[in-house]
């Protein structure tokens, strides 16, 4: 916890008041190809995209070179399924040669088939791997992920990586199909040796701005009448986490999850963060560069790209990103939010903390609650280090 405060919170706090010298990371949706059919994913539902102009290795290497020049040290690689991108390991190696760490988000369908040499590439370049698993109950996970082999392969892949000393995080999307199984699945993940499970409510906008959103996607979330059951599951997770060597992000989204579910259920018509924050600040539009699988620089993860790295590279990546994100930054800084801001449940915990740091006086009530929460978490983290084996 102290290391996290030193390496993340303090630099972030300084950035809010002195300016951010550079983005924190770059994120690629490296391919639109996938080998699962998740019920909440536009790619999984085969919703057609508007273009076939896809990233190639030359595009990716240019971005990595630009990152190195700007001293950006983290590259998030998403999909589709990244391990279907034929030169993924070449990308990891090239990034590693520039002292850039890759965080890969996969469904785990094929990682266990990698050769020892290929696994060594991930390890030698300090890669972090996230595996999407909605439930450790096979029937639930098979349904939400659209594959009967999804859980079996995810567990095999996690074991392959962990045996090689590569850290694995499970990612779970909270839906009306798995919300009563969250605690049970966390215990099973712990028994597998997974060190971290991160959760997020389902996003009701399209995850890919060039594709239409799944019809009635918001209704895949937990119904508001079941919010107490969901919150009870989350509190059980927190209790388990305090006495076992596994981490989650439950403490960060528990303060606002009810407001989000209230909004997705159609009960509330306001911005979901208004029940917790008095003034909102979007950190991610200033800290992240999102690049789509066609090379488009998205103003944010939910905004369609108007500028593409394939068209003009003479200005450099940072200049292109500044141009691509100028309009949304101006709007959000003036309190003019876009509709998809209400869908930003995957990034909101970071933005919530950013809002508390940026506007501590206006958000003083939430800040006090959060500081108490962080103090409690720090105490439990210290307890775990000293007494939990």
Image: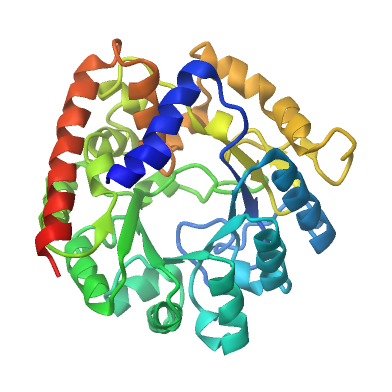
Q: Quadrant of residue 301?
A: top right
Q: Is residue 137 above or below residue 320?
A: below
User: At which x and y percent is residue 259?
Assistant: 26, 32
Q: Is residue 139 left or right of residue 294?
A: left
Q: Quadrant of residue 264?
A: top left
At horizontal 81% and vertical 43% (from top left) the residue drawn is 309
Query: Which of the image's four quarters has the C terminus?
Result: bottom left
User: At which x and y percent is residue 152?
Assistant: 39, 84
Q: Is residue 297 left or right of residue 47?
A: right
Q: Quadrant of residue 19?
A: top right
Q: Is residue 214 above or below residue 386?
A: above
User: At which x and y percent is residue 250?
Assistant: 24, 48
At horizontal 44% and vertical 37% (from top left) the residue drawn is 343
Of 331 and 352, the residue lying toward us: 352
Residue 270 visible (yes or no) = no
At horizontal 45% and vertical 62% (from top left) the residue drawn is 39
Q: Tally the numbered discs.
A: 0
Specify how the rendered protein is coloured: rainbow
At horizontal 45% and vertical 32% (from top left) the residue drawn is 11
Q: Is residue 198 left or right of residue 81?
A: left
Residue 239 visible (yes or no) = yes
Of 10 and 275, the residue lying toward us: 10
Q: Is residue 118 above or below residue 77?
A: below
């Amino acid at each position: 916890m102290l290391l996290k405060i030193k390496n993340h919170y303090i630099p972030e706090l300084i950035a809010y008041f002195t300016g951010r010298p550079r983005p924190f990371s770059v994120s690629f949706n490296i391919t639109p190809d996938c080998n699962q059919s998740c019920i909440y994913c536009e790619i999984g539902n085969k919703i057609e995209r508007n273009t076939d102009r896809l990233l190639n290795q030359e595009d990716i290497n240019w971005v990595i070179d630009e990152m190195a020049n700007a001293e950006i040290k983290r590259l998030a690689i998403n999909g589709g399924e990244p391990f279907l991108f034929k030169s993924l390991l070449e990308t990891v190696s090239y990034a590693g040669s520039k002292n850039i760490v890759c965080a890969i988000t996969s469904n785990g369908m094929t990682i266990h088939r990698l050769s020892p040499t290929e696994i060594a590439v991930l390890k030698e370049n300090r890669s972090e791997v996230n595996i999407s698993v909605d439930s450790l109950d096979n029937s639930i996970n098979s349904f939400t992920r659209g594959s009967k082999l999804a859980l079996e392969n995810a567990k095999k892949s996690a074991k392959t990586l962990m045996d090689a000393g590569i850290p694995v995080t499970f990612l779970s999307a909270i839906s009306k199909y798995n919300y009563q199984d969250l605690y049970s699945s966390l215990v099973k993940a712990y028994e597998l040796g997974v060190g971290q499970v991160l959760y997020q409510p389902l996003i009701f906008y399209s995850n890919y701005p060039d594709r239409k959103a799944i019809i009635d996607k918001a209704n895949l979330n937990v119904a508001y009448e079941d919010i107490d059951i969901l919150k009870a599951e989350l509190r059980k997770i927190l209790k388990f986490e305090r006495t076992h060597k596994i981490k989650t992000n439950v403490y960060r989204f528990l303060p606002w999850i009810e407001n989000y579910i209230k909004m997705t259920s159609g009960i509330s018509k306001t911005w979901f963060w208004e029940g917790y924050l008095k003034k909102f600040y979007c950190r991610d539009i200033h800290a992240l560069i999102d690049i789509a699988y066609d090379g488009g620089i998205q103003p944010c993860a939910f905004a369609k790209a108007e500028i593409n790295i394939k068209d003009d590279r003479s200005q450099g990546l940072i200049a292109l990103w500044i141009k691509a994100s100028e309009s949304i930054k101006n709007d959000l800084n003036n309190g003019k939010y876009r509709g998809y801001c209400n869908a930003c449940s995957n990034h909101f915990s970071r933005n919530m903390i950013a809002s508390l740091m940026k506007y501590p006086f206006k958000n003083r009530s939430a800040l006090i609650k959060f500081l108490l929460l962080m103090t409690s978490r720090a105490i439990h983290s210290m307890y775990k280090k000293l007494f939990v084996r």
